[in-house]
Image (tube, coloured by chain):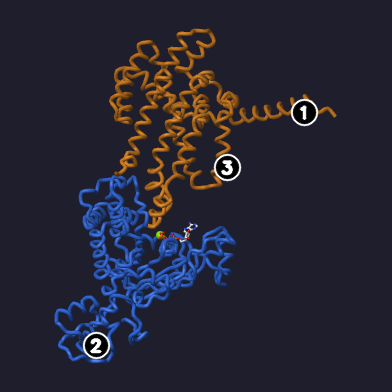
Chain colours: A blue, B orange
Amino acid sequence: MAEAVHDIEIRNLYKIFGPNAKAHVADVRAGMTKEELKQRHNHVLALDNINMTIRAGKIQVVMGLSGSGKSTLIRHINRLIDPTEGEIIYDGQDITAMSVPELRRFRRERTAMVFQKFALFPHRTVLENTIYGLLVRGVPRREAEERGRRWISRVGLDGFEESYPNQLSGGMQQRVGLARALTNDAEILLMDEAFSALDPLIRTDMQSVLLGLQEELKKTIIFITHDLDEALRLGQNIAILRDGRIVQQGTGEQIVLRPRDDYIANFVRDIRRGHVITVRTIMRKGERADTPLTLPATTLLEEAARAMTNAEVSRANVVSRDGQNLGMITLSKCVAEMIAPDDSEAVDPEVQVA
Amino acid sequence: MDLTEFPAMSRGDMRDFRIAIDQSFREFTRAYGDQLEQMFHPIQVLLNFIEGLLIGGPWIVVLLAIAAVIWALSRSLRIAGGTVIALMLIGYFGMWEDTMRTIAMVSVCTLIAVIIGIPLGILMARSDRANALITPVLDMMQTMPSFVYLIPVVMIFGLGKVPGVIAVVIYALPPIVRLTNLGIRQVPADVLEAAEAFGTDGRQKLIDVQLPLALPTIMAGVNQTIMMSLAMVVVASMIGVRGLGQPVLQAINNQYFTLGVMNGLAIVAIAIIFDRATQAYGRRLQRHLEAEHG
Ligand SMILES: Nc1ncnc2c1ncn2[C@@H]1O[C@H](COP(=O)(O)OP(=O)(O)OP(=O)(O)O)[C@@H](O)[C@H]1O
Ligand SMILES: [Mg+2]
């Protein structure tokens, strides 16, 4: 089982689409925007100075509106797209500078990808699609089929092994793409809106599969989504792209609590905040309440409110994992934070979530 | 200045010019003719072998074998049955041997066209330079009146089967090259990208993805090539290729109306059989694409 132990380091990455891309990097550095570049030079700025560290064995979510550069970014990690400038370091090697055979090996042995538009092989059955990566890598067909069947079953496509992609519904095709990537058992999983065509039930199930893969097998997963709920459920780290720039990076809680600008605020406006924010973030540090109720610091606001209501108390102490008192929260503050952003009370603006 | 007459080169210059070229080509023929003939000899052997099988074998066996091949391609009893009936009629009207010769000829020509044409098409699909270079040659092969390139071919090889095959292949090659090229270039970019993401090399991409997805288009090319070889049998008979073309030629020269029509119809019958069989095969190849969901 391939376990990821190396971070992916993206450094000063620029991507401009157009015949004369290299020449325009300087303009972009000097502050030319995507629109200006398009109007004046008819080049498309897709990625603008991306810097991020994708932690080994973690799920990194990338969000952003349509056209913000998400697919372009994820394609750089297995170099389906060559950058205009910048580097991506993995395991001491710059992916953007690999030779053709090196790149081929890197793709075969260390990455797997789920495509936004599925990109299944129409002339191959579900099973043949699923095992293609293993066959390319030289795994014997019998073993490959065995592994393929397991994942086909796991994504709920039992009995469709011999069907052709065109005989399946959109959601089923997407699951074939999923099985095809997962069968590859690579340490880096690139997932471009991999769940977008799934119904809510299967979607939740597939999210669990992904969380399991990350937890047990320590895969590094880069996951693109438009769905904030999904981002918050999956992402240990979330990056938000706008016009090819990263406008905010952080945990889900940080982004929901402190959207850096209106663009992000719009993203997070409709989120169930009580479902994301933990009591640690809004507690009054160091204070102690005279109440029998204690809550772990990682308790979500919804759970905290429920616990306080059930216990018929209006305050609770917040404790760390080893039982140390960290602070206290009130029910009213809890509810206020769940409903809307509230900066009136003394929430420490520097609060960082561990 | 007289503007109504184009300032052409003088008659004498023209004659010298023609003679010079003809002369050097004749010298070339004398010098390399035997070697070239030697090189193309295997074609003669193959053609003779297939002809021998078709003509020398018991007619009932040959008939059933052809019907079996047609059925294997088309998986259609209707087409296979039609083949049997057509061949029986052809035999009854005394055209069995000529028909077998023509089938042998068309089979060999198609085989050679496929062997040359598919790799050429692949090359054109992979390299824009090759594409730009070969396309005008194909245009020329298709538009140049076939009689024109019969001249040098006959000068080198004399009359007979081999020059016939060469002439037919030159005429019938372009569609398979073009359609192989087209088929490969039409493979969706996202599917190719997926293959690439799995770390395929060029050969794997070609064999696992590009050729299978181009196959229906390539089959359309094979079909065209067969049709064009059949269309050439009459012309080829002018340089000594025996088969259904010769009686037609004879009929033209002597105004034998019935003979011409009968042999013409036999050619049409074979054309229809080949066409339906290869088309049905092509459709079978892309069944997975037609089974659209919803
Ligand atoms: N091959 C290309 N040639 C030119 N421009 C491109 C190309 N691919 C992408 N772009 C441009 O780059 C920008 C980013 O595109 P990208 O596909 O990465 O967006 P995205 O964030 O994935 O959007 P979506 O959510 O709709 O999938 C867009 O402005 C797009 O027009
Ligand atoms: Mg996209």
Chain hosting mark 3: B
Could you say whether the residue bearing mark 1 is in a helix, strand or loop?
loop
Q: Residue at x 36, y 21 (%)?
A: B54
* Cβ atoms at labels 3 and 2 below 8 Å apart: no
**Relative image position of residue A322 (x, y in whole percent):** 20, 87
Picture quadrant of residue B34 = top right
Image depth: mark 3 or mark 2 in front: 2
Q: Which mark is residue A152?
A: none
Q: From mark 1 to mark 2, how far is it between C-alphas?
A: 105 Å
Chain hosting mark 2: A
Could you say whether the residue bearing mark 2 is in a helix, strand or loop?
strand
Q: Amino acid at mark 2?
A: Met
Q: Amino acid at mark 3?
A: Leu
User: Which residue was labeled with disc 1?
Assistant: B6
Callouts 1 and 3 in the same chain: yes
Can residue A90 be seen here? The reply is no
Viewer-proximal residue among B129 and A329: A329
Can residue A64 be seen here? The reply is yes
**Relative image position of residue A193 (x, y in whole percent):** 35, 60
User: Which residue was labeled with disc 3?
Assistant: B133
Image depth: mark 1 or mark 3 in front: 1
Q: Residue at x 71, y 29 (%)?
A: B20
Q: Quadrant of the N terminus of chain A?
A: bottom left
Callouts 1 and 2 in the same chain: no
**Relative image position of residue B158 (x, y in whole percent):** 56, 22
Q: From mark 3 to mark 2, how far is it between C-alphas?
A: 79 Å
User: Which residue was labeled with disc 2?
Assistant: A328
Please state if B40 lies on the left or on the right of A282 as rendered. right
Query: What crowding class fits label 2: few (fewer than 14 Cα within 10 Å), some (14-19), or many (20 or more)?
Result: many
Q: Quadrant of the C terminus of chain A?
A: bottom left
Q: Residue at x 51, y 14 (%)?
A: B249
Q: Amino acid at mark 1?
A: Phe
